[in-house]
Image (tube, coloured by chain):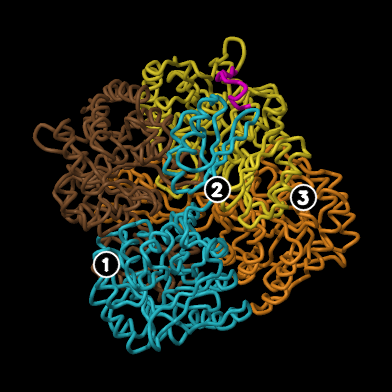
Chain colours: A cyan, B brown, C yellow, D orange
Amino acid sequence: MVIVMRPDATPADIARVVERVEESGAEAFVSRGVLRTIIGLVGDVATLHGLNLRALAGVADVHRITAPYKLVSREHHAERSTVWVGSGDSRAAVGPDTFSLIAGPCAVETPEQTLQAAMMAKAAGAALLRGGAYKPRTSPYAFQGLGLEGLKILADVRAETGLPVVTEIVDAQDIDVVTEYADMLQVGTRNMANFALLQAVGQSDKPVLLKRGMQATIEEWLMAAEYVAQRGNLDIVLCERGIRTFENATRNTLDISAVPVVQAVSHLPVIVDPSHAAGRRDLVVPLSRAAIAVGADGVIVDVHPDPETALCDGPQALFGDDLQALADAVRRLPPLLGRWPTG
Amino acid sequence: MVIVMRPDATPADIARVVERVEESGAEAFVSRGVLRTIIGLVGDVATLHGLNLRALAGVADVHRITAPYKLVSREHHAERSTVWVGSGDSRAAVGPDTFSLIAGPCAVETPEQTLQAAMMAKAAGAALLRGGAYKPRTSPYAFQGLGLEGLKILADVRAETGLPVVTEIVDAQDIDVVTEYADMLQVGTRNMANFALLQAVGQSDKPVLLKRGMQATIEEWLMAAEYVAQRGNLDIVLCERGIRTFENATRNTLDISAVPVVQAVSHLPVIVDPSHAAGRRDLVVPLSRAAIAVGADGVIVDVHPDPETALCDGPQALFGDDLQALADAVRRLPPLLGRWPTG
Amino acid sequence: MVIVMRPDATPADIARVVERVEESGAEAFVSRGVLRTIIGLVGDVATLHGLNLRALAGVADVHRITAPYKLVSREHHAERSTVWVGSGDSRAAVGPDTFSLIAGPCAVETPEQTLQAAMMAKAAGAALLRGGAYKPRTSPYAFQGLGLEGLKILADVRAETGLPVVTEIVDAQDIDVVTEYADMLQVGTRNMANFALLQAVGQSDKPVLLKRGMQATIEEWLMAAEYVAQRGNLDIVLCERGIRTFENATRNTLDISAVPVVQAVSHLPVIVDPSHAAGRRDLVVPLSRAAIAVGADGVIVDVHPDPETALCDGPQALFGDDLQALADAVRRLPPLLGRWPTG
Amino acid sequence: MVIVMRPDATPADIARVVERVEESGAEAFVSRGVLRTIIGLVGDVATLHGLNLRALAGVADVHRITAPYKLVSREHHAERSTVWVGSGDSRAAVGPDTFSLIAGPCAVETPEQTLQAAMMAKAAGAALLRGGAYKPRTSPYAFQGLGLEGLKILADVRAETGLPVVTEIVDAQDIDVVTEYADMLQVGTRNMANFALLQAVGQSDKPVLLKRGMQATIEEWLMAAEYVAQRGNLDIVLCERGIRTFENATRNTLDISAVPVVQAVSHLPVIVDPSHAAGRRDLVVPLSRAAIAVGADGVIVDVHPDPETALCDGPQALFGDDLQALADAVRRLPPLLGRWPTG
């Protein structure tokens, strides 16, 4: 940490900062400039943070220098991690050596629709099936998902297709039932800072797919992952799904740079959701190609056998030629970048 | 709703849209332009939304014309509402005729600190006491609040000062215990789209303070209020607390315009939190004055007897001269705008 | 400045940074932490910036500690400035002791419309007349202003009403003609980073009204003012006019906090433009009240005798009751905050 | 256009809107709903826009349905365009069949540095040389470019290497001198809405590289291109270079989706600038790969023979292994997507 003192800070103000830092067992290095003094702190960041130095007289600013996350950082875990989802024969890897296609319907509607979507996904090379049983919807009047019935449909479709299932959990109270049926627990963009939920999935024994909050900085996203990790679960896959900006030609702005930025500082796998980022079917394939090329560890997309009748996000679901184009990209591009598709 | 067809939409595409709309019991009015056709829809918005028209062939865009919220709208409830908090002698109003100062410590730390902060708040004219027992923190290593012990401290301080208590709830599972001790349930900015929590407070019999998500549009914020209202609880006070933008001179950008914008479309009271918006003590008083002048129904601010030792957000807590200046503003300005302070 | 070294920086990397800094005549203070080393630099910021230290091996980050602007800073000019506009009898002050209403039509259309708007402005207490002769429009097919003819109309109306004139300049090539007719040169939001234009107005002898870029941080805005000041013109009034965010209920998001933030670091006067920030007539009066209350040195608003026929921004122009309400606010509120209206 | 009337609009209000529309020669189709009436307008958009309908009594909102740009739209020019830069032997295409690498130093510093950078660019497969002679810098105290001397250096290096030159113009007054030396005129992000400059380059006979404003919507960017086109110059290449968002891990957020979004509505070529978007060398190669994969028509990157001593943006300039990796990507990836590299 670096403390920047105000130009009018007195020697006593400076001495007080140094004293408080040294009392805590840390060290303080004072650099006196013409206009202002800066004090470099060396010690445990959590302890220093707890000192509340910004509130001391004469302090203008406190700059944190090191990242606030530990367990998800590459600093002590340089090698990038692989997360395994599912068990037995239907086990899939998400990590640095592979490229994983995760596909399925936005919402589970019926057994038939879910099975058809899963077959489409599998034919396109998917390694995992996505599908929502609990849907967080902006409107209380919109379809909220089938709940438990949806989970059962997903489990049946897994039995039929061999695809492990990833599904969203929206309430910490549902942890037992979702864990019973799903292979991977998704925390959605609206719940990225729902710390009670993060702690609940952190205590489960299932891997977690953690979507970036649409308003979250990359650092906050990694801190959300740290919440999960701190409870003992390090099987976390991060998912970039677009951030909120002023541009409204797309539903969100896909922050493609987030993939290499995260990979540089965290060992966790990171995938991309082009369907929810763009909200437009015509962008899903080009953005999936971009995700592969930028080095993402996978993509997660919506597919639907009949988007016209979809109860959720039909306009972005892939089918037909678009899905074929995606399958081609997933087969051809990753090997050029040293990865093999997992599907 | 208005459907905009693509320039290359065929007459059959247009007919299909009209057919689907009319099947649902709604009406469709077709306007054929030189380049494109637009179709005006008249009928129930939720029904029309469920038709998934955006996924039909030939459809370029769907514009929603009417607001998606109903219960919180002024369309059928033109008069602005007053929400009463607390009971018996310690009952306070938040609404269009009054100006309510809500003050207290960011976090409940000890009985002494909470009581002192409450006495400061009361002396400054506060009508309600704020204080956090459950704290949603970005870092799992930061102080997470005293929990139940904090709630008990708040109840004791209420008994001593007569100030009704507003405190944050961060997990639907805590609803019973928080409801037992608090007079008003705060839903924080990170949980504005935590629909499970919104439904939980919607079923309680305590009024709700609903902070705006730092990334939420005003419409999404009102839809979050609609979630609460739809479960039967219309005692909702909205709180603007700053949105996330590119500007980093302040922690968030206080969207002062949101106050009159909300008041024009919703009957719910709306207050302002300048402490969390700015994150800087020196801005709290000027922004509180601005909130009063723009027509807000109240402000909520952090006060602390000793900000240097505060466990949470010390740099923004008021005390001494700043608190005195706030008290002066709360006493002098609202009457000029036709309101009386409630403290 | 503070240099943060990478965890894997070698002693040679650190020595190289220190050497380069000391060669330039500045000082370097090294603080060695467990994980990383930080180096505090003391010396001339421009020199240090020119060293390009971020490109050296082992450097993770460079934090600038002091503000990059000098002439517009309060560090060496603690007292807030007053800028005088106009000459002789029609001379108006914008500064810390007064509150200045600037009003007029968005665009000069005809002599009659301009005169009527000026009379409305004057009756409402305006100290200066605004009016656009050169209009920067998003569409090349929209009305681009009357140009020279518009300037002449403004000068005539000044002669008739005694109100000094502020008008926008959009091209450095127009500097002579605009300077001949106007009393104050406005640099609009789209040109805040048009450095050629900033230098041109910086060489003129007329005061400058510098609007904040809709995408500019406060620091960049002050750097734009520094461009003007560096060419010798310190008669600059800053104008907050809303920034671009994700919220679209208003045209821009008025960053009301920018007023006290700027006043804390710069001696220049700062006013608010609620008309262009909101783009909605019904918000202009509440936002003007908020601007007064937050401590702005003035507001600039659109007025029009017949908004229905306005060639530019009719929906936000004030007239009738709204203008009367603004006049009341401008008369009653500033004295409460220790200012007198200048009109 | 669609007019949405307020719920309390009277039949007379509606009649007035219809009347004004029909007087202008356009048609109005009225759809009366239970809560509100909407009016579909069919006619010339510019005319309708000029009617200022939003200011009429009873009007709640005006939705524009068609795009405001014409000349750059694909509606009447379905085929995507190719822009040719340079003449004779050193002529390069930017368009849908090729992939163009544009590379060179951020700023021209010396003849040697520029020639070395150009040789590096050429070896990496560049088809065009970039280099800044006039630099728009945030600080008036930073290096502002060599001006005319820089242009001459660029012309000499073109003679030596055969690479056509693209360079930035920052002031309409420089149009003659820049046109004399350069093969392509770059309008930078800060000047995207400098309409005087857009008109100047629109009247020149050199192709234009139009960077997106860091705060501009895609529609505003296309309107800026329309300004250029409207003056007669349709040889425009668009360049996505990152937009400003709340995320600060990168200097800007590269809006990779903008590439397919623009290609769907405009016939103009669109390239990507990953260097300025990210501001970090380690991201330039992954983002360039993403640009190729998403379907961009080219990339423009900074290269420098000695980034440590660069006068501008050294930390993002490529050299050595990174440049080699970029060259590989440019050679190998475009053919997979049906393009050939132009270098």
Q: Quadrant of the C terminus of chain B?
A: top left
Residue pointed to by mark 2 = A65
**Foreground residue among B328 and C195:** B328
Q: Closer to the camera: disc 1 or disc 2? A: 2
Q: Chain of mark 3?
A: D
The image shows residue B318 at horizontal and vertical percentages of 36, 30
Cα distance in 3D space between marks 3 and 2: 26 Å
Please tell me whether mark 1 sits on a helix, a strand or a loop: loop
Choose top left, top right, bottom left or bottom right for residue B112.
top left
Report whether D122 appears left or right of B123: right
x and y percent of residue A244 in the render?
Answer: 46, 55
In the picture, the disc for residue D310 is: 3
- Crowd rating for badge 2 (residues with CA inside 10 Å; few <14, some 14–19, many 20+): many
| Vertical side of D176 occupied by C66: above or below | above
- SS type, badge 2: loop
Residue C74 colored magenta?
yes
The range drawn in magenta is C72-85
